[in-house]
Amino acid sequence: MILETAQLTIKSSETTAFKAAMAEAKLIISAMPGFIDLQVNPCIEIPNQYLLLGRWQTLADHTEGFRKSVHYQRWKALLHHFYEPFPEVFHYGEATIST
């Protein structure tokens, strides 16, 4: 399992439109092979910031399967114009330390 993370900073006046677009985008990504789940959590301290946590079966499912698909083009059109600055995406492996 791979954990995808991104800190999303949304243009201040766009948070309501972002939430609606993300609801639609979740339908797109959830149909992708290897997709497990997606959370988009709002930051308590910074109202226009969100933490995206996506889980994929493999790194290739995300980077090759999703990002190189026509579905990603729709995802991109729905969401990328909201970000300021554009987020960095990181991928993490299985937990080595847990409680």
Image (cartoon, rainbow, N blue to C red):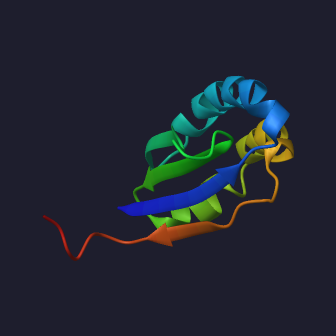
Nearer to us in this view, 24 or 52? 52
| Residue found at x 50% / y 69% | 91
> Does residue 11 appear anywhere in the picture?
yes
> Does residue 61 appear anywhere in the picture?
no
Please state if 21 lies on the left or on the right of 99 as rendered.
right
At which x and y percent is residue 15?
73, 31
| Vertical arrangement, residue 20 with respect to residue 48, above or below | above
Location of the C terminus (image quadrant): bottom left
In the current view of this chain or complex, which residue is farthest to the left?
Answer: 99
> On the image, which quarter does residue 68 sit in?
bottom right
In the current view of this chain or complex, which residue is farthest to the bottom?
Answer: 96
At which x and y percent is residue 9?
71, 50
Location of the N terminus (image quadrant): bottom left
At which x and y percent is residue 62?
57, 58
Nearer to us in this view, 43 or 60? 43
Nearer to us in this view, 96 or 85? 85
| Residue found at x 48% / y 51% | 53
